Image (cartoon, helix red, strand yellow):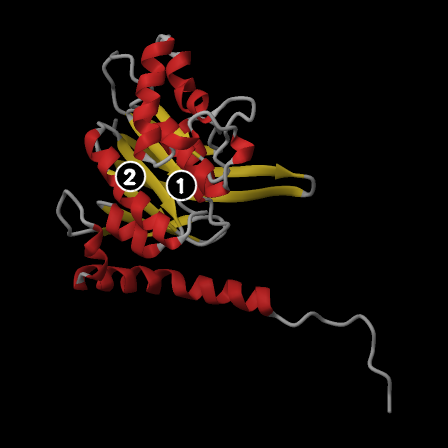
Amino acid sequence: MSFRCEHLSKSFAMRDGFVQALDDVTFSVGEREFVSIVGPSGCGKTTLLKLIAGLLRPSAGSVVPSAAPDDGRPASALVFQEHGLFPWMTVLENVAFGLETRGVGRSERHERAMTFISSVGLAPFAHAWPHQLSVGMRQRVGIGRAFVTDPRLLLLDEPLGSLDAQTRFLLQEELLRLWTRSRSAVVYVTHDIEEAVVLGDRVLVLTGRPGRIQGEITVPLGRPRKLEYAVDEKVTALKWQIWKMLEEEARRSLALSTREPVSSVEEPVP
């Protein structure tokens, strides 16, 4: 599935007025393209994914999808940072849920779900409940649930954000393998610049409040992608290029968060 965001803006009504989350965002995603979006907290990355998924209506502009054949595939699947599992369902039932809503029989949907559960390393926990899993394990369940329905578009919001470094590295490999086998386009939100470059065909840099696209970087690495590219000189150069786009805002945010609080009590005069 390909689509285009045309001059997309989004504001939210607040008690004392409006807060604008995105301003005049325009970009496109091609069929089976993997596009990473990187930016600081608060720049509207999650809001953008919700607009693309149709969970929010834009205040201005539009999301224009390409025409798609009626082959029974869902238009999109969205994986949130919060993973959003049903607490009353087991891991197997959570992953198979999308297939159930599409009328797939119990035996087939459980077989297909187990394939993806095994892919993310959770086969021993197929019959566990979400509360019995770590945050990182619940995120992996969300990844399996997204891929199992074979959507035309995958929208991934920090899907590996709660994982330790070693597990994250392994799941990046598995994510690329699953995507290579699928027919989906991907929009992948991350705070990790290296991850954005190593996984993506392009990297969009979103900054500001409201969020605007500051830059678009094409990643000159071939497919299939190897994570060893992380030490490639071209990746290092791209990481530095993206960091320079983010540096000023990152330093400003750090200065605000580390500023000494002003005391409301005057010091006594000696």
Where is mark 2, residue-wise?
A: 175
Q: Position of residue 203 (x, y in %)?
A: 28, 49
Q: State the residue lying farthest toward the left.
A: 222
Comparing 144 with 149, the one in front is 144
Q: Quadrant of residue 63?
A: top left
Q: Position of residue 174 (x, y in %)?
A: 27, 40
Q: Residue at x 65, y 72 (%)?
A: 260
Q: Alpha-carbon neighbours of circle 2 within 10 Å: few (<14), some, or many (≥20)?
A: some
Q: Residue at x 31, y 59 (%)?
A: 242
Q: State the residue lying farthest toward the front.
A: 124
| Element on which disc 2 rests | helix
Q: Position of residue 13 (x, y in %)?
A: 61, 37
The C terminus lies in quadrant: bottom right
Give the number of the disc on residue 235.
none
Q: Which amino acid, by three-letter code, is at mark 1?
A: Pro
Where is mark 1, residue-wise?
A: 159
- Residue 161 visible in the shown view: yes
Left or right of 20 in this view: 185: left
Q: Is residue 76 above or below residue 158?
A: above
**Circles 2, 1 touching at the beta carbon (< 8 Å):** yes
